[in-house]
Amino acid sequence: MTAERDVDIQFRGDVTVELIKSAASDADVLWAARVSTKGENSLAEIEADPERSKGLINYLMRDRHGTPFEHSSMTFYVKAPIFVFREFMRHRTFSYNEESGRYRRLDPVFYVPDAQRKLVQEGKPGKYVFVDGTAEQHKIVTEAAQESYRQSYRAYLEMLDAGVAREVARTVLPVGLYSSMYATCNARALMNFLSLRTKREDSAFPSFPQREIEMVAEQMEEQWAALMPLTHAAFEANGRVCP
């Protein structure tokens, strides 16, 4: 039967984030903020004393004057499991375009937690921690996930080969399947995302993100920090709170 044919299934435990394009710099914050006092001369202030610029950005962040941080744009290409995207898209200030299982055959690439992924939850909702799993628990997770993925993808191919529409055949595929999307945001939206999707001891408000979306957030933050170092520094200095 077609369902028994060999399929090159890939198992991964990582995510990838690539900055595709950007129009984002600390200067965008400066001219947007200074228009309130400088009017048409605000653009001339971009090359003003760096320390004064640093102080202005820190003031805006500290006192939560957020709109100057919206005059920037970054587009990321993200490849991650579908369950990560379901959490990601709760951030409605981003713009998204994701690959479609209605229009293309989906590749057999699936997520399996690696050995560093903490497996055991201790505590109750709102007050819990994750701790390392045992070698046996990791073995169970790996083997069970891989078996499930192979079975579901065989069923998917069997339906496609029988002439079933892609949008129907995809219903058997799990949320551990990798997808890809473009995600576009401004710096303010990104800071809101980072404040909720990373766990840092120095954050003013605690956050408890799922590790897989935190992996995405960490890569996005690293690339954003290189574009807007003064803004990123002010974000960290003021408790990682979105202004």
Image: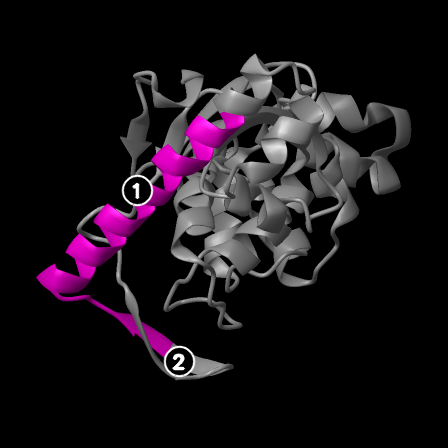
x and y percent of residue 39 in the render?
89, 31
Residue lying farthest left? Answer: 135
- The label on residue 240 is none
Residue 191 x/y as whole percent: 59, 48
- Say whether residue 219 is left or right of residue 69: left
Residue 181 in percent (x, y) is at: 59, 26
The kind of residue on which mark 2 rests is Tyr
Magenta range is: 129-156
- Comparing marks 2 and 1, which lies closer to the viewer? 1
Q: Amino acid at mark 1?
A: Glu
Asked if one can make out residue 183 in the rendered structure from this viewpoint, the answer is no
- Viewer-closest of 42 and 162: 162
Tell me which residue sits at (68%, 35%) in the image. Answer: 186
Q: Relative to residue 97, is residue 231 depicted above or below? A: below
Marks 2 & 1, CB-CB < 8 Å contact = no
Q: Main secondary structure of the magenta part?
A: helix
Residue, disc 2: 128
Split into 4 quadrants, where in the image is the N terminus? top left
In the image, taking residue 148 as reference, residue 159 lies left or right, namely: right
What residue is drawn where x is 21% and y is 57%? 140
| Classed neighbour count for the residue bearing mark 1: other residues with Cα under 10 Å, few (<14), some (14–19), many (≥20) | few
Question: Which SS class for mark 1?
Answer: helix
Q: Which mark is residue 147?
A: 1
The answer to whether residue 88 is left or right of residue 175 is: right
Q: Name the quadrant containing residue 226.
A: top left
Mark 2 element type: strand
Q: State the quadrant of the C terminus.
A: bottom right
